[in-house]
Amino acid sequence: VLKPERGVLINMECKIWAKNVKHDRQDRIGSAHFELMID
């Protein structure tokens, strides 16, 4: 189990994988991006 360090920004990108979903990283189609920081 990893324990994130306080004050460090963690970037995450989740991709959706399905036949009917197109991906474009520049337009962020087919994925979700979020950032997490522990206080």
Image (cartoon, rainbow, N blue to C red):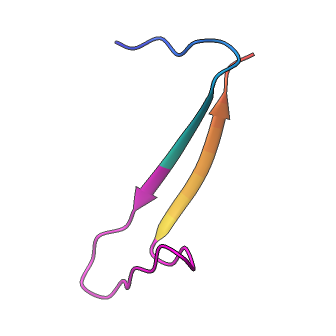
* Image quadrant where one finds the C terminus: top right
**26 over 37 or under it: above or below:** below
The span picked out in magenta is: 13-30
Q: Is residue 18 left or right of residue 8?
A: left
31 sits to left or right of 22: right
Residue located at (56% from left, 42% from top): 11
Residue at the far right in the pictured view: 39
Magenta region, mostly helix, strand or loop? loop
- Classify residue 27 by image quadrant: bottom right
- Residue at the (50%, 45%) spot, across then down: 12
Q: Position of residue 23 (x, y in %)?
A: 39, 79
User: Toward which corner of the image does residue 15 lie, by quadrant?
Assistant: bottom left
Residue 34 among magenta residues: no
Is 24 one of the magenta-colored residues? Answer: yes
Identity of the residue drawn at 24% across and 84% down = 19
The x and y percentages for residue 25 are: 47, 73
**Residue 9, position as x, y percentages in the image:** 64, 30
Residue 32 % position (x, y): 53, 61
Q: Residue furthest left?
A: 19
Q: How many marks?
A: 0
Vertically, is 39 above or below 16? above
Against 39, residue 32 (above or below) is below
Query: At x 64% / y 22%, what residue is drawn?
Result: 8
Looking at the figure, which quarter contains the N terminus?
top left
